[in-house]
Image (cartoon, rainbow, N blue to C red):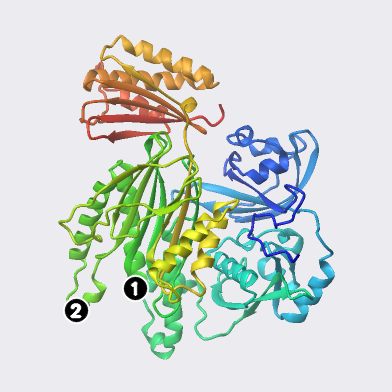
């Protein structure tokens, strides 16, 4: 029986040997050499569980102690090579690695490390692949198997990417060259595998190590065996070097684009100006969207962003993942009206505003109300009677804001004119969450409503912008049915789910931007959360310290007890002295973080102040701020919670 193409990360039907398929081992290492994330592939390759590696120096994984780790020169953004590592059972493993350097918007530097682990060969591939690839496609060539992992790359392709074929073999294109263009190209390759039809796309990408961008015409062709089955995809990239309008690196500088649009050159080469403006907008859009998703334990998350094609240009769609206090996480998806630089700039403002409002723990409905006021003020400040169509300031923007709490497994949602999220239960039922729509942002005077639901552990949440459902080929009901079908199909990873959704709903470059955020809920069970009700009596502070020490011993975190005792003592004392009963102490152990929360019935928030030399009090919150990784206040309908997070890395 002919074997159907499979999605990346899934085993083809009929495979008898479990775990025999190729996979990618992934890990993240901080700039200080400490492992911050350890993927399932890495655990499978070396035998170490995540808890045995995360928070410890990566050098401990080297096969020979004392041998220096591979050297990386200052300013280097990528490294590749073979490293001898030590398996958990003690044996030596030679592992080819490819590492990419990432810098977050906050300035944190991390290295994303990947290694392709090959599965058993099903058939002799080399000879037919040589024949198919070089017989059917010219130019810079690469061949990917049905799982979209690289099999072959010719000399031109190796030169363009500055990697040898051996260094790339077994990796997916986004793992070889992390970039939105790679994500879009991989999505098109999946269409080739599934439909057997060729795909074409154009992109401006700089060759590795160069500043100047080149225009590339990329052809994706199916490679078939004698029976007509698609066995692989050939990627052929044609350099359009010298094409009119191919932008230079200096055109990508936003300030120069805004203040010196080169009117003379635009009049002489209008097509070149349009390409430069499109490239500038794309660059701005990419810089404002999350480069990497933050580390948190409440949700497993995957995301995709596809810019609009055609004459409309890049719009203002955005998404975000924001860790909150109490191990909670906020998910945001929004859509700014319009396209071009103004829409992207407005999107950046709103994304920053959402993160600022989320940082003070506003409920979803209040956050949208503040965002609504902000857009009204922006519109008034930017009003230009001569160009009214460019002065909207974000009026009509839609936004969906979701907060998930892994302790209660409750999800709180509010939306402003945005499509509601889709939910897939662990049993496979799928539905749209019933959330009152609320008006789009910027209209003012109308309320937003919040809905709170409990989601079983393992539920799937899908947040998206309307560009996903507005393809030309189908109406809204048909698009929703297609979306539901793609979400409910079993998949090994959320990245596979994202790719399936885009493949099912988009058969061509979308007419509007598409942002997609898919999350699977996790739960913090009772063994990771403990709560005590405390009387409003100063003598109970000693009991609170004792409760904390005993619980940390039960969690095998004795080394963290000293700092935790001090934090608990100060927060409980503060609640007794300045708050109102009832008082409650809660400890949460989430991965590498210990969270201490003290709640009371007073709504008055404490303020950190500098105590004078002879003051007897006033130093508590200052001490908490010095000891905790971060701290803050969370208000509730009745009362407040003061929380502090303590890092457990190294304990």
- In-front residue for pair 227/25: 227
Q: Earlier in the sequence, mark 2 or mark 1?
A: 1
Residue that extends furthest to the left in the rendered view of this protein: 445
Q: In this figure, what is the number of numbered marks?
A: 2
- Residue 386 disc label: 2
Residue located farthest toward the top when viewing the structure as drawn = 539
Residue at 43% in and 76% down: 472
632 on left or right of 273? left
Residue for badge 1: 259
Which image quadrant for residue 410? top left
Dot in front, 2 or 1: 2
In the image, taking residue 171 as reference, residue 518 lies left or right, namely: left
Which class describes the residues within 10 Å of circle 1: few (<14), some (14-19), or many (20+)?
few
Which quadrant is home to the N terminus?
bottom right
Check disc 1 and report its element: helix, strand or loop. helix
In screen coordinates, is 297 left or right of 185?
A: left
Viewer can see residue 207: no
Quarter the C terminus occupies: top right
Name the one closer to the observer, 161 or 460: 460
Q: Residue at x 31, y 63 (%)?
A: 346
Query: Of residues 129 and 291, which is closer to you in this image?
Result: 129
**In this rendering, is residue 606 above or below 317?**
above
Instruction: Classify 10 Å Cα crowding around label 2: few (below 14), some (14-19), many (20 and above).
Output: few
Q: Residue at x 47, y 30 (%)?
A: 525
Element marked by disc 2:
loop
In whole angstroms, how far apart are the C-alphas of marks 2 and 1? Answer: 19 Å
């Amino acid at each position: 029986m002919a074997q159907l193409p499979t999605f990346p990360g899934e085993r083809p039907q009929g495979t008898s040997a479990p775990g025999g398929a190729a996979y990618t081992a992934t890990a993240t290492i901080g700039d200080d050499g400490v492992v911050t994330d350890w993927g399932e592939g890495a655990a499978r390759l070396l035998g170490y569980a995540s808890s045995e590696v995360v928070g410890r120096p990566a050098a401990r994984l080297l096969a020979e102690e004392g041998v220096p780790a591979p050297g990386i020169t200052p300013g280097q953004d990528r490294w590749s090579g073979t490293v001898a590592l030590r398996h958990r059972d003690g044996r030596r493993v030679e592992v080819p690695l490819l590492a990419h350097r990432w810098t977050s918007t906050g300035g944190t530097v991390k290295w994303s490390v990947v290694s392709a682990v090959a599965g058993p060969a099903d058939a002799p591939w080399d000879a037919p692949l040589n024949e198919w690839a070089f017989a059917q496609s010219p130019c810079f060539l690469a061949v990917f198997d049905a799982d979209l992992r690289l099999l072959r790359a010719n000399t031109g392709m190796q030169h363009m990417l500055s990697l040898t074929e051996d260094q790339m073999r077994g990796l997916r294109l986004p793992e070889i060259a992390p970039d939105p263009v790679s994500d879009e190209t991989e999505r098109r390759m999946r269409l080739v595998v599934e439909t057997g039809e060729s795909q074409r796309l154009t992109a401006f990408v700089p060759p590795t190590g160069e500043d100047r961008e080149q225009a590339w015409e990329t052809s994706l062709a199916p490679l078939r065996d004698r029976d007509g089955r698609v066995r692989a995809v050939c990627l052929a990239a044609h350099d359009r070097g010298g094409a009119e309008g191919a932008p230079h690196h200096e055109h990508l500088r936003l300030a120069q684009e805004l203040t010196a649009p080169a009117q003379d050159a635009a009049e002489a080469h209008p097509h070149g100006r349009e390409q430069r403006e499109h490239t500038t907008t794309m660059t701005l859009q990419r810089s404002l969207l999350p480069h990497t998703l933050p580390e948190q334990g409440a949700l497993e998350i995957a995301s995709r962003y596809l810019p609009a094609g055609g004459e409309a240009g890049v719009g203002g769609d955005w998404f975000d993942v924001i860790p909150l206090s109490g191990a909670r996480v906020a998910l945001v998806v929004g859509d700014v009206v319009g396209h071009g630089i103004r829409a992207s700039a407005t999107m950046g403002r709103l994304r920053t505003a959402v993160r600022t409002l989320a940082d003070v723990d506003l409920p979803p409905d209040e956050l949208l109300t503040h965002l609504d006021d902000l857009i009204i003020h922006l519109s008034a400040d930017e009003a230009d009677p001569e160009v009214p169509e460019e002065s909207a300031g974000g009026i009509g923007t839609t936004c969906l804001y979701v907060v998930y709490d892994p302790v209660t497994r409750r999800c709180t949602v509010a939306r402003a004119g945005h499509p509601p999220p889709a939910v897939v239960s662990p049993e496979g039922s799928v539905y749209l969450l019933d959330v009152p729509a609320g008006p789009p942002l910027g209209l003012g005077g109308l309320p937003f409503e919040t809905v709170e639901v409990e989601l079983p552990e393992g539920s799937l949440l899908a947040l998206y912008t309307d560009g996903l459902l507005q393809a030309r080929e189908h109406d809204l009901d048909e698009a929703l049915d297609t979306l539901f079908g793609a979400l409910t199909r079993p998949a090994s990873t959320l990245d596979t789910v994202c790719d399936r959704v885009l493949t099912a709903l988009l058969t061509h470059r979308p007419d509007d931007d598409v942002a997609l955020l898919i999350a699977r809920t996790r739960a913090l069970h009772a063994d990771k959360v403990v709560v005590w009700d405390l009387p409003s009596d100063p003598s109970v502070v000693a009991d609170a310290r004792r409760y904390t020490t005993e619980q940390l011993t039960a969690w095998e975190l004795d080394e963290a007890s000293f700092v935790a005792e001090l934090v608990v003592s100060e927060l409980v004392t503060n609640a007794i002295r300045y708050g109102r009963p009832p008082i409650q102490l809660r400890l949460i152990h989430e991965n590498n973080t210990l969270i201490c929360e003290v709640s009371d019935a007073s709504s008055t928030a404490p303020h950190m102040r500098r105590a004078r030399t002879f003051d007897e009090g006033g130093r508590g919150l200052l001490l908490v701020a010095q000891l905790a990784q971060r701290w803050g206040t969370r208000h509730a309908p009745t009362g407040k919670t003061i929380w502090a997070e303590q890092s457990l890395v190294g304990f």
